[in-house]
Image: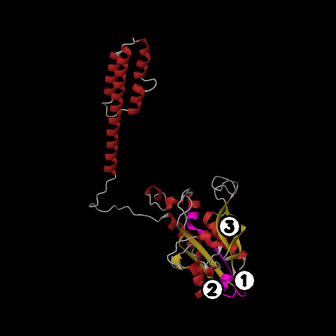
Amino acid sequence: MKEMLEKIRASALECLQNDDADLEAIRIRFLGKKGELTAVLRGMGALSAEERPIVGQLANEIRADIEKAIAEKSAVAAEKKLQAKLKAEKIDVTMPADSTVGHIHPLTLVQRELEDIFLGMGFSIVEGPEVELDYYNFQALNIPENHPARDTQDTFYITENILLRSQTSPVQARTMEVQKPPIRIISPGRVYRSDAVDATHSPLFHQLEGLVIDKGITMGDLKGVLEIFAKETFGEETRIRFRPHHFPFTEPSAEVDVSCFACGGKGCRICKGEGWIEILGAGMVHPNVLRNCGIDPEVYSGFAFGFGIERIAMLKYHIDDMRLLYENDVRFLNQF
């Protein structure tokens, strides 16, 4: 039996000399439950009481030698793989720049597409500061101090009265203060909220909001604008629906859904079997907001809407994790 054990040791070590050796296959062949060493040890019952400890000790030594040889071979293979990877990914900063030209980020791509849709409907693009006053971010929009609605838009305060805007709605308030109706604007840009990072939330994201103020504006006008937006964004067969909701700055207010562009409303994984996907909030501008901005609600009316650009991008490109949009992984970005 000793000779058989020594042959197993020699055979295993010989196999490991091969540079292309399959280490897992060698381990199974010699040390597995049905391996050669195990098969020999099963015959130890035929040995005398004096021989068993001697053979058992030898078998353990051989097992240890084979395991050590496999571990060393594995470490060498891992090091070779690492060096090859480092060599392949090495960047020589003294070499001329790569001629590869970048392309538009998916968020920018979606934002530009949305801007083109609304520009085609006669809207103008207006931008405003990301570091905003509490008055424009909340108070002018019918959200006074200590109002419960502030909890859902918890943002980052720099001082008691200065903060990072939680929405692009302050742009609308600033516009209404300095521009007489008719007003037809969209306000895209970065916004900030105190949200934990996960697959669907981020403390920094992008919004696009719209505002129309004029004489005789109705919910019908809002529906018409959003239908054009939905068809241009998700396809001609897309339908929209309004569900009653509450926003402090609009009255009446609605959550707006689009029919699932993947299944046509039949129900699928993307729409979670409902046939509809929520995409934005909208409503008629609250009279208090008009008054706060110097517009007479007895003469003028208007509507407002807003949505997250990340959400539109995730739906449009079937992205299931918002974090992919911020991580700058070229393997992801090269798909667009």
Q: Which residue is mark 2?
A: 293
**Relative height, residue 181 to residue 22 (above, below):** below
**Residue neighbourhood size for the residue with mark 2, other residues' Cα within 10 Å, grouped as few (<14), some (14–19), many (≥20):** many
Q: Identify the amino acid type marked 3.
A: Val
Task: Name the mark on residue 256.
Answer: 3
Question: Residue 57: percent from the left, percent from the top?
Answer: 35, 21
In terms of depth relative to the viewer, which is nearer, 61 or 336? 61
Q: Residue at x 66, y 87 (%)?
A: 295
Residue bounds of the magenta highlight: 288-313
**Relative height, residue 332 to residue 214 (above, below):** above
Q: Residue at x 43, y 58 (%)?
A: 330
Q: Identify the amino acid type marked 2.
A: Cys
Mark positioned earlier in the residue sequence (1 or 3): 1
Q: Quadrant of residue 191?
A: bottom right
Q: Identify the amino acid type marked 1.
A: Gly
Q: CA distance from mark 1 to mark 3?
A: 22 Å
Are the two marked residues, 2 and 3, in contact with CB atoms closer than 8 angstroms? no
Q: Which residue is mark 1?
A: 216
Q: CA distance from mark 2 to mark 3?
A: 26 Å
Mark positioned earlier in the residue sequence (2 or 3): 3
Question: Residue 124: percent from the left, percent from the top?
Answer: 57, 79
- Camera-nearest label, 1 or 3: 3
Q: Is residue 214 visible?
A: yes
**Residue neighbourhood size for the residue with mark 1, other residues' Cα within 10 Å, grouped as few (<14), some (14–19), many (≥20):** few
Mark positioned earlier in the residue sequence (1 or 2): 1
In terms of depth relative to the viewer, which is nearer, 243 or 141? 141
Q: Element at badge 1?
A: loop
Q: CA distance from mark 1 to mark 2?
A: 18 Å
**Residue neighbourhood size for the residue with mark 3, other residues' Cα within 10 Å, grouped as few (<14), some (14–19), many (≥20):** many
In terms of depth relative to the viewer, which is nearer, 159 or 40? 159
